[in-house]
Image: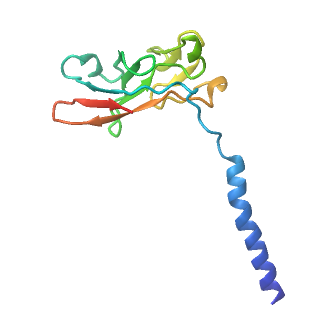
Amino acid sequence: MFIFVDMLMRFSIFSAMVPLSLWMTSCGEISHGNIPEKTVNFTVRPYSMDNVLLATGGYKYFPYGYMGVVVYHIGDMDEEYVAFEQACPLDWENGCFVEYDKEQDVLTGKTCKGRFSSFTGYGRDKKNSGYALRKYHISYFGTNGEFQVSN
């Protein structure tokens, strides 16, 4: 009986400690730098006006969002295109925005030099590892490759 109670108490303590230890070692929250959110809702037409987006690695800037939206063609079957806010979460208050750096395949802050993945929008360097670009939702419709970018 004593062994059973001892095992039960150890299990109870262990089951309480596992979630606590997972919580304490989990990654910190990702910040978008408190960039004010603007309504984004526009259509992209890769087979007509926006044909620079047809090739994998193609990108285009659009005048929406807080400082603009960059749409990038990653060419992945699950997620063919991604769209990010251009306002840099590291220094948007001072007008810093990201542009696509084709050589390094990253989005780089124009003045702060923060680097973000062109696939996920997450920070690529130690100084901005807790930051990410705001990612917009993409909805595909029709048979001509058009899609909607929205938040």
Could one spot residue 113 in this view of the protein?
Answer: no
Left or right? Give the position of 75 relative to 47.
Answer: right
Pinpoint residue 69: horizontal percent, then vertical percent: 40, 21
Left or right? Give the position of 79 relative to 34.
Answer: left
Residue drawn 72% across and 64% down?
16
Depicted 14 relative to depicted 82: above or below: below
Depicted 17 relative to depicted 46: above or below: below
The mark tally for this picture is 0
Pinpoint residue 118: horizontal percent, then vertical percent: 46, 25
Residue extending farthest to the top is: 111
Residue drawn 16% across and 30% down?
144
Q: Quadrant of the N terminus?
A: bottom right
Q: How is the image coloured?
A: rainbow
Could one spot residue 139 in this view of the protein?
Answer: yes
Q: Nearer the viewer, residue 7 or 90?
A: 90
Residue 21: which quarter of the image?
Answer: bottom right
Pinpoint residue 58: horizontal percent, then vertical percent: 34, 19
Q: Quadrant of the C terminus?
A: top left
Q: Nearer the viewer, residue 12 or 78?
A: 12
Residue drawn 72% across and 56% down?
20
Pinpoint residue 120: horizontal percent, then vertical percent: 47, 32
